[in-house]
Amino acid sequence: AGEEVHDRHDALVTATLAGILVTLLALATTASPVVAADAELGLTTEEVAPGVERVLSDGVHEIDGRWVEMGRDGSVWLTEERRFAELGGDTVLEWGPGRTSGILLDVAPDGTVWVVEDTPGKPVVKIRSFDGERWTTHRRALSDSVEGWAIDIDAHGTVWAAWPDGETRDPQRSSVVASLDEGGWQLLERRLPGRALIDLLVTDDGEVWALQLAGPPLRFSDGEWRPPTVDEVAAGDDGFAELSLTDDLAGSVGRDGTVWLIHRGVPGPQEALGDADAILRFDGEAWTGWSLPSELAVGGSVTVAPDGTAWIRHDWPEEASGLYHFDGTELEAYLPGSHVLGEPRVTAGGSVWVVSESNERRPERTTLRIAPEAAGAAREASGSAP
């Protein structure tokens, strides 16, 4: 009997201590932001909304308010004007004062870092690689900046690049697209026509796409650059109207070949072009279209995530600014009232990185990461993002 009483006493004490601990944790949580460390990247973060974290540091580098880039190998990099640092790693690339003002970066599957860099005061742009020990220059051309240049690495490690035609200083001119092998740069059959090139992407199946400042993405096929052909579109909802593709659209392509387009109708005498506003997806087999939600009726650019869903950056009008996620079923709003600067970066695991600027008299920039499990949580969140 004595032992039984003793056991009950111990159980009561344990339960009481556990209750006190839970209460203290709850008070600590409500009194200050949740701070968590990411095991893989060593991040310190604050939760600012369900599934949305403000990223403060990786234990070595201050991240908050700064940009990140993704490598083809899955690495995440903190980018500064003259410094690139691998998060969770020990690779730091630095350029001395006055050496460069613009840098494009990608990382091959074998870890080799590739950059396109320009030099202020000198009309020279170089494509270089860093193998962990030394730098190698693969192309040097006359140009004032990296505008109009692009670099991408395919799943097999082949490097693809684009640069203005004829080494011109005008980024609006046609671009040359080429791949690099042991024999040097191998040009594609034709040059990318007009419009300002903003990015180059090679899908996992080896298709080469060029993304433009305006107009649809272009795919290189049979020696020509062609926009995606939209036909036999299946309605994703009852409000969708049949339409023909026009130039009044924005779009992007994912590594898996998924194409997303935002089409804005052109009412007036050109009735054949269609006057419907729609968002369209090509999944590799067929097109599906939905009526464009009113939140996106004015502007927006698309980033395709590894899972084939769309992240849409919207910056005007002010009350509709923020970041949206569309998976073909629901439109989720994130960071309402904040200006998302640049395109979001989506990791292979589904985390979304953005730099956001608050809509205040003295705007503050923050680096934010949206967790993959945040889908659905945005509907329950209220208020504006920091």
Image (cartoon, rainbow, N blue to C red):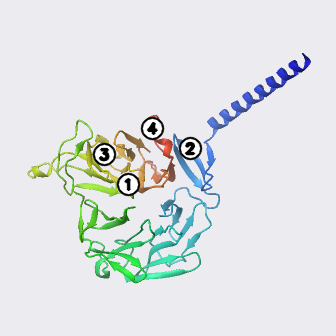
Q: Amino acid at mark 1?
A: Thr
- Report the side of 32 relative to 51 (left or right): right
Residue 181 in the image: x percent, y percent? 41, 79
Tell me residue 272's x, y (percent): 10, 51
Q: Earlier in the sequence, mark 1 or mark 2?
A: 2
Please name the residue shown 33% across and 57% down the image: 252
Question: Which of the labelled discs sits on residue 376, or is there none?
Answer: 4
Q: Which residue is mark 1?
A: 303
Kindly identify the amino acid type of the residue bearing the numbered disc 2: Glu
First along the sequence among labels 4 and 2: 2
Q: Nearer the viewer, mark 3 or mark 1?
A: 1
Whole-number angstrom distance, CA of label 1 to CA of label 4: 19 Å
Q: Bin the neighbour count of mark 1 within 10 Å (Cα to Cα): few under 14, some 14-19, many 20 and up.
A: many
* N-terminal label among 3 and 2: 2
- Does residue 122 show up? no
* Residue 175 position (above or below residue 226): below
For disc 2, the neighbor class at 10 Å (few under 14, some 14 to 19, many from 20) is some
Query: Helix, strand, or loop for circle 2?
Result: strand
Residue at the image point whose x is 47% and y is 64% from the top: 72
Query: Could you tell me how far apart the alpha carbons at marks 3 and 2 are, in whole angstroms?
Result: 27 Å
Q: Work out whether residue 384 or residue 224 is closer to the camera in this orientation and state it.
A: 224
Q: Quadrant of residue 60?
A: bottom right
Query: Which residue does the numbered mark 2 point to in the structure image?
Result: 47
For discs 1 and 2, the disc positioned in front in the rendered view = 1
Classify mark 3: helix, strand or loop: helix
Q: Give yes or no for contact between labels 3 and 4 (Cβ–Cβ under 8 Å).
A: no
Disc 3 designates what residue? 296
Provide the secondary structure element on which disc 1 rests.
Answer: strand
User: Where is the N terminus found, in terms of image quarters?
Assistant: top right
Q: Name the residue type under label 4.
A: Gly
